[in-house]
Amino acid sequence: MKILDHLEEWVITFLIGAATLIIFVAVLHRYASGLAIPGLQDWLLTLDFGWAQELTIIMFVWMAKFGAAYGVRTGIHVGVDVLINQLNDTWRRKFIIFGLLAGALFTGIVGSLGAVFVWENGAHYAIYNWLGLSLDGMFEGPTTPDLEVSTWKVYCAVPFGSYLMCFRFLQVCWNFVHGGELPHHDHGHVEGIEDVDMPTPVTPKTAGSKS
């Protein structure tokens, strides 16, 4: 399970880091190519970064899907639980389990619908072609405008991310049923920095005050 946790974090970190770098280079290229610097301007104009926007959009879509699953595992999603926390322990437990299972059901349905869409959008053609099977009457599927990548590869983010999120809901539900605890994220905590207890301020005594 630790391997899956680390893989999830590595994928999110790589996607957000690479997307940020690509955007930075593309914007820098756009403005630098407008500078009338002999030699440099001509060289910059030969570079084509028209694909950068499309690629970063795809990367952020994948990051969002995997980030949603990460949020379930760490408890970072915002939840309105004021009413549930006012219930007794028995009913509170039932409502929490119901909510987690509902989340698993919803994401499982989304993942299944996404898998069907990916299959019909060209994945079946690619798999049959790879296996050397007959392609009669099959639809190859569209491609993206700039990168010319099969769109079914891009849309794989929906079933992969949704099924992972479904698994995380079931994982949290299992841990809650057997341990009674839910993942909690402290929004004031910064990863990698140890929390320091601040000393209690001492109010100086004024003249004539009684001890």
Image (spheres, grey):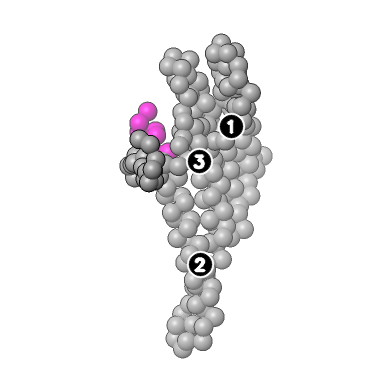
Of the residues under marks 3 and 1, which one precedes in the sequence? 3
Predominant SS along the magenta part: helix
Front-most of residues 48 and 26: 26
Mark toward the start of the polypeptide (3 vs 2)? 2
Locate residue 197, reporting x and y percent: 34, 39
Question: Mark 1: which amino acid?
Answer: Gly
Q: Is residue 15 left or right of residue 138?
A: left
Magenta stretch encompasses residue 165? no
Residue 72 x, y percent position in the rendering: 51, 32
- Residue placed at 46% from the left, 80% from the top? 43
Q: Which residues are magenta?
A: 1-8
- Mark 3 to mark 1 CA distance (whole Å): 16 Å
State the residue in front, 22 or 180.
180
What residue did someone put label 2 on?
26
Disc 1: which residue: 79
Which residue carries the number 3 mark? Answer: 67
